[in-house]
Amino acid sequence: GAGVSQSPSNKVTEKGKDVELRCDPISGHTALYWYRQSLGQGLEFLIYFQGNSAPDKSGLPSDRFSAERTGGSVSTLTIQRTQQEDSAVYLCASSRAPRSLPGELFFGEGSRLTVL
Amino acid sequence: GENVEQHPSTLSVQEGDSAVIKCTYSDSASNYFPWYKQELGKGPQLIIDIRSNVGEKKDQRIAVTLNKTAKHFSLHITETQPEDSAVYFCAASYGQNFVFGPGTRLSVLP
């Protein structure tokens, strides 16, 4: 399809395990965002990639969280040594908007992470 | 940094009535204000947006107004329908990023 694709859609893991969440943005979109949405809550910014520029990591809650974006396309969010408070829906969004002019974000359906 | 507040947190209206959701922001440098609708189990989807050089924008039953002086913007939905039931988020641009409000759960009662 032509939308943002995220995988897995659901992930259940045990406390202390590492998890990887994947995002395939819309082809040609240079900007990619990761947000976290806890149950019934708003969207918490995690990290932002724009083209080949250094990512904005200011929203990452701890050094257990990291993200990469390879070849300006696919992105992987990694959470090491997961904790129960990491349980949430992780949303990825992409945008064609240039750095100088913010515009529409296209969201994926999210990856629901449950840490037991 | 930017802070976005949103009210009410929940809103119930009768089908056919109007719904209004209000947001305030703190950073006067913000210049783009989108509204997103999130249905259960799905990602948010843009329904309307407004830039700071415009005071109002309308798209069929949906309108957004912006008061830059007061730093607030509002979403107006007229002639509400059951399919309008969802969670609505406002957002304000913050540099290259966005800060989202906490959301409003709208229920349209038949």
Image: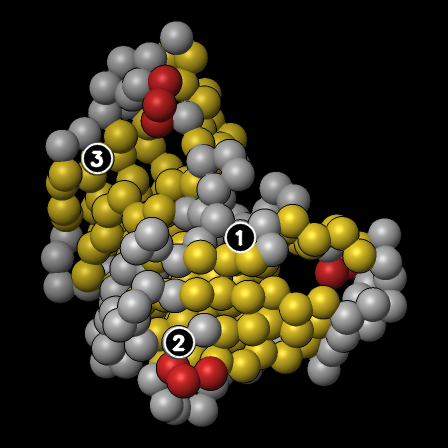
Name the residue located 83 percent from the left edge and 67 percent from the top edge: A17
Residue A114 pos. (x, y %): 75, 51
Vertical placement of residue B12 versus A9, above or below = above
Number of numbered discs overlaid on the protein picture: 3
Regarding residue B28, the answer to whether it shows in the image is: no
Name the residue located 66 percent from the left edge and 73 percent from the top edge: A78
Regarding residue B68, the answer to whether it shows in the image is: yes
Q: Residues within 10 Å of mark 3 (few under 14, many from 20)?
A: some
* Amino acid type for the residue under numbered disc 3: Ile
Cα distance between the residues tagged 2 and 3? 34 Å
Mark seen at residue A110: 1
Q: Are marks 1 and 3 on the same chain?
A: no
Q: Are marks 2 and 1 on the same chain?
A: yes
* Amino acid type for the residue under numbered disc 2: Ser
Cα distance between the residues tagged 2 and 1? 17 Å
Q: Secondary structure at mark 1?
A: loop
Residue A79 pos. (x, y %): 71, 71
In the picture of the structure, the residue carrying the numbered disc 3 is B62
Q: Viewer-nearest of labels 1 and 3?
A: 1
**On-image quarter of the C terminus of chain B:** top left
Q: Looking at the image, which is closer to me, B103 or B24?
A: B103
